[in-house]
Image: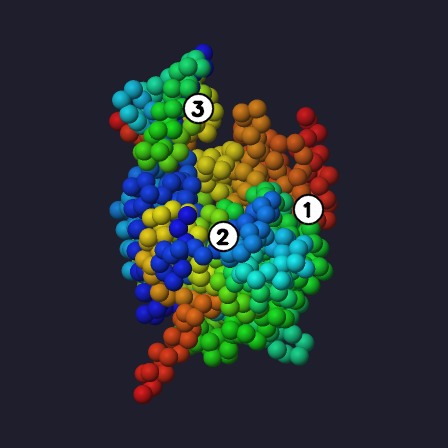
Amino acid sequence: MTSKVVTANRLTDGLVVYLGYAGWTEDIHLARRASDDASREELLALAGKAVSDNEVADAWLIDIEAERAVRRRERIRAAGPTVRPDLGHQATRSA
Amino acid sequence: MPLVKNKQITEDSWTHIADAEDLPFDGSVIISADRWLTDRESLVHRNAPVGIRLRNNQSPADVAVDLHRFGVIALEFPAFKDGRAYTQARLLRERYRFEGEVRAFGEVLRDQLLFMQRCGIDAFEIHKREDAEAFEKAIGEITVFYQPAADARTPVSASRVTAVASWAY
Amino acid sequence: MYRYDEFDHKFVAERVSQFRDQVQRRLNGELTEDEFKPLRLMNGLYLQLHAYMLRVAIPYGTLSSRQMRKLAHIARVYDKGYGHFTTRQNIQFNWPKLVDTPDILQELAEVEMHALQTSGNCIRNVTADQYAGVAHDEIDDPRIYAEIIRQWSTLHPEFSFLPRKFKIAVTGAETDRAAVKVHDIGITILINEAGDPGFRIDVGGGLGRTPIVGKTVRDFLPKQDLLTYLEAILRVYNMLGRRDNIYKARIKILVQSEGIERFRELVEMEFALLHGGSLDLPKSEIARIRAYFSPRAYEKLPDQLEEGMEASRADSEFDAWLATNTVPHKVSGYAIVNISLKPVGGIPGDASAEEMEAVADLADRYSYGEIRVTHEQNLTLPDVRQKDLYDLWLSLNISGLATANIGHAGDIIACPGLDYCALANTRSIPVAQNISRRFADMRRQLEIGPLSINISGCINACGHHHIGNIGILGVEKNGEEFYQITLGGRADDNAAIGRIVGPGFAFEEVTDAVETVVNTYLSRRSHENESFVEAYERLGEEPFKEALYAAR
């Protein structure tokens, strides 16, 4: 089952973040999910506010299925460069 | 919208008139270059000051013969990323020696003001009030220039000659 | 190399201060992302997949050891301990924080560096031949003119909001080592029939979506007219270049749509009006800049590569490295040394802070403190005494920087691709790594001979795949990574755009496909010295197509 989450790059350091239940998180697994139109609208509104509040540079919705992003690009964003397993969120999470 | 001229926010003595609007009997008006070219016959007899708006894909050459009639030429920045008016401004100043006011309108933001001024623009319809207020600061941020333009600032090449010359004594 | 004077120092200091203010205004919301984006791009700051990316300018690829150490320091303190050298002779840092960038720029300014105009719709880093000043076949040092153009183009008020990015390259030799034919403006130094020095100006070359070899707009331009002529070209482009479609906004599109004759007319008309004006380049100014690049006080040394090195040449690894990684220097007793940043299975062009420092130390010890960055993502030490080559090689070896694959199959050029870049469709680095590992055997690489393999992860072609002998372009198909192979590209004076050989290959198939192409060449070449690209030009694509697709 596909749901949507909001992702962005944090303004101050450019790192990949996801809209969680208590602000932004670097862990895609903790992202707030929307599986119907209403909750999707709500997520978009929160994302828009975060952009105008200068928390993030830009924000957009992505598809999640079975605990991971559908698109390869988003999987790479969530984890880090595939050629440097020591960098990106994959490195901090495996700690 | 604030007009900045001579580094300060000033009253705008000109009024933009859209093509669809009737021309007021008097008052200083800025009309489109297209309108000037179409109605030139009658417009040359107008007693009150006239200025024109050039589209940024129009060549100053189109109105070159009448430049001395215009108190102001307004150049458009439809998006701040669209830099064609910089060329138009330089041509007006350096090639056609236009001495009236050259003003920028459209999306005129703080971080483009110095470039505009260097190209010979001397009046600015500035989008945001705080940018208008910061005008003098904005154009003073860089004082070293690497190429000649339409302004009177000395490019580095000339300063360097002077610097060398001064050690010679 | 060029040294900043008081004016240059003042300029970069003001620029840092201006950018600091712009960052502050972004952080406090006074500037929206849309308003800030062109400003940060003009300072080389991108927002990529994982983080911001800062592209630092290395003017025409020339670097001092002091500057290299500062880059290592920045990598260590503000980034994650490494940097990436690019196909335009710049360096990229992949993890700077926006809040730190003013400080990074300040540190760069301390060593006469900046990140100005490495991005955005303005005139970018002017690139030149990495062997400038030291190559045998050089007519004049292209860096002199690259420096003159660099200064003229710095914060040019008329040309900071062009329809699109603008890239200029200068070459000073008979052989084009700066790929001038695929630049927006390509400048070739030459002497005309009357014996006068000047330039040939080519325009409208480029890679990307619509790769094309540039056309000559002026066969001979006297030196003093250089900046005036460039200003004329840029002005025509600024006014007439398309702004409605970013994929049609480069000057190459304008040259194509007008046709070179009409385009030339427009430029020459503008040039005639500007000629003799304030951009006239006096001999004194050229001489003043030339003085920064005057030849060193070289020692008088005999050419000793043939004899006098028997002991070290008995070391066959050293001998192999000599053959692939060194190039004859114009001064007797000296050599040009290339340092490969393509270790087997490594990430092309990446260097750790430790590696950067090692190169800086070696430059101090063996090359008068000077380093070059090539547009093939490697480094060069331009002035090494032949008698020091063995010791240099030993040191390079210890630092893992002695891979002897320059110009051969292992010397792969790859853009960062989908592992880093927000524009990419597919990954490119792992493709390079797989191919590199498949061809790890140096004897095999030598048997194959000169071969360029270029990989781009999207149509923007930052890996310059169009001009690779074997080019690989990643495309996304049904959510999967596919790779198109092109053959026959060349970056030299016979510049050519590679031709797509057929349907693409999946990620798992590409390495085999490349090996098939290479094996086809090996089995069909007329003799050992017929290079891959020569064989392709003679044979055409048929044998390669057949080998790749017959089984399908």
Residue B2 percent across, percent down from the top left: 39, 51
Give the residue drawn at x 47%, y 26%: A72
Q: Is residue C326 left or right of residue C362?
A: right
Q: Are marks 3 and 1 on the same chain?
A: no
For label 3, the residue is: A62
Chain of the residue that carries numbered disc 3 in the rendered image: A
How crowded is the residue under tag 2: few (<14 C-alpha within 10 Å), some, or many (20+)?
some
Give the residue drawn at x 63%, y 56%: B36
Residue type, label 3: Ile
How crowded is the residue under tag 1: few (<14 C-alpha within 10 Å), some, or many (20+)?
many
Residue C518 percent across, percent down from the top left: 61, 41
Residue C454 percent across, percent down from the top left: 55, 44
Chain of the residue that carries numbered disc 2 in the rendered image: B
Residue type, label 1: Tyr
Q: Is residue A92 left or right of residue B106?
A: left
Q: Are marks 2 and 3 on the same chain?
A: no
Q: CA distance from mark 2 to mark 3?
A: 49 Å
Q: CA distance from mark 1 to mark 2?
A: 68 Å
| The one of C50 and C432 positioned closer to us in this rendering | C50
For label 1, the residue is: C536
Residue type, label 2: Thr
For label 2, the residue is: B15
Q: Secondary structure at mark 2?
A: strand
